[in-house]
């Protein structure tokens, strides 16, 4: 779906890369047990967003259009699936405006980026967090 202006990447450090394995969908979804924690609507929406995404994992499909392309899922299931995929840290979503149901999606790389902070910074942060009241 061509856009009039390019989309900005939502999470630059999490651009999706094609894994070394033969699959476009990262095999770690299976090997790290993420698939076992997903419901059918979540799997369907993730697959749809992966197929609809550009090279940075970005797409801008409205829920009603996704529902038309995936008639086996009603909009409320897709809404819940979107929330769950965000919770599983598989996608990012930014609504067009506050409270809007539609916006921009980014399929994220699987797993969090490695913590590249120096050990001294990690130690200082750990000390600070231990001192915070619980």
Image: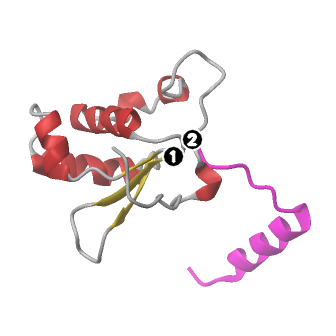
Residue pictured at 57% horizontal, 15% vertical: 22
- Callout 2 environment at 10 Å: few (<14), some (14 to 19), or many (20+)? many
Please state the horizontal and vertical placement of residue 82, each as a whole percent of the image: 29, 50
Q: Is residue 42 left or right of residue 3?
A: left
Q: Identify which residue, 114 or 99, lies in the foreground.
A: 99
Residue 118: assigned label: none
Residue indicated by mark 2:
16
Q: What colour scheme governs how the chains and residues are painted in the rendered image of this protein?
A: secondary structure
Q: In the rendered view, does 15 fall on the left or right side of 46?
A: right
Q: Position of residue 8 (x, y in %)?
A: 51, 62
Can you name the residue that lies furthest to the front here? 4
Mark 1 or 2, nearer chain start? 2
- Name the element at disc 1: loop
Answer above or below: position of 127 versus 31.
below
Query: What is the quadrant of residue 43 in the picture?
Result: top left
Region rendered in magenta: 108-134
Q: What crowding class fits label 1: few (fewer than 14 Cα within 10 Å), some (14-19), or many (20 or more)?
A: many
Q: Residue at x 23, y 31 (%)?
A: 40
Percent position of residue 96, x then y: 31, 69
Q: Residue at x 10, y 31 (%)?
A: 72
Gap in Å between the C-alphas at discs 1 and 2?
Answer: 6 Å
Q: To which residue does mark 1 refer?
A: 108
Percent of width and height locating residue 25? 48, 27
Q: Quadrant of residue 103?
A: bottom left
Are discs 1 and 2 less than 8 Å apart at CB? yes
47 falls in the magenta region = no
């Amino acid at each position: 779906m061509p856009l009039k202006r390019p989309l900005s990447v939502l999470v630059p450090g999490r651009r999706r890369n094609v894994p070394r394995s033969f699959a476009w969908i990262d095999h770690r979804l299976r090997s790290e047990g993420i698939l076992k924690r997903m419901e059918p609507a979540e799997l369907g929406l993730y697959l749809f967003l992966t197929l609809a995404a550009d090279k940075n994992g970005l797409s801008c499909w409205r829920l009603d259009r996704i529902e038309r392309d995936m008639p086996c899922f009603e909009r409320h299931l897709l809404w819940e699936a979107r929330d769950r995929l965000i919770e599983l840290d598989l996608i990012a979503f930014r609504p067009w405006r506050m409270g809007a149901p539609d916006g921009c999606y980014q399929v994220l790389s699987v797993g969090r980026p490695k913590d590249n902070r120096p050990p001294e910074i990690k130690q200082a942060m750990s000390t600070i967090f231990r001192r915070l009241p619980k």
